[in-house]
Image (tube, rainbow, N blue to C red):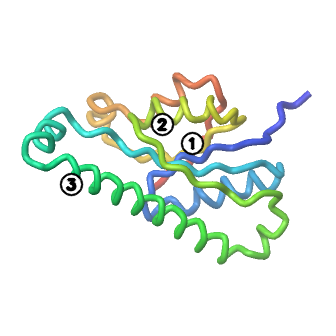
Amino acid sequence: MLPPIKKILYASDLESKTQPALGLALNIALAHQAELIIMHSMEPLSPQAVNMIYYYVPKEASEKMHEEAVKNVEERMQEELTNFMDANKEELATLSTPPKTIVVHGVPSEIIQETAEKKGVDLIIMNSRTHSRIGQMVIGSTANKVIHNSKIPVLVVPIK
């Protein structure tokens, strides 16, 4: 028996070139009448940035800045999704449930897998960018880390 796809997690980096990946995620959700969760990971600040904020920015101000950043990301995700859904209204009319958006905090490669497991998804969809060989060795890539460590199948959509 083929494994069912009932819930999909699309890990979005909110770049302008990710529309094809969002379209593919929605198409797969439509084909399987699956629930689609669109998530964005906000990376933690470096220790140097945390120290600078702690010593130079009042706690209330830094908390407000963080809340505004999360709000901006949530609004941007919702706007991108709404625009895409409006542009493809007819094709997506039979989607069983509207996609949900979430913002999570953590190292992307780790939090993508953690969120996928918590939400009980059957498929992770994400973007991959082309990096130089040196860039791949030094930095690695989020997609590469997720592919090699995930217990859940991962579909990677190249962005050129």
Q: Is residue 147 left or right of residue 91?
A: left
Which of the labelled discs sits on residue 61, or is there none?
3
Residue at image coords 83%, 31%? 3
Viewer-side residue, 72 vs 5: 72
Find the distance from the CA under tag 1 to the CA under tag 2: 7 Å
Q: Secondary structure at mark 1?
A: strand
Mark 3 neighbour density, 10 Å: few (under 14) some (14–19) many (20 or more): few
Q: Position of residue 83 (x, y in %)?
A: 58, 74
Viewer-side residue, 82 vs 151: 82
User: Looking at the image, do the residues carrying marks 1 and 2 touch, with CB atoms under 8 Å apart?
Assistant: yes
Which of the labelled discs sits on residue 143, or is there none?
2
Find the distance from the CA under tag 1 to the CA under tag 3: 38 Å
Q: Is residue 150 left or right of residue 94?
A: left
The residue where tag 1 is placed is 156
Q: Position of residue 30 (x, y in %)?
A: 79, 57
Which of the labelled discs sits on residue 60, or is there none?
none
Residue type, label 3: Ala
Residue type, label 1: Val
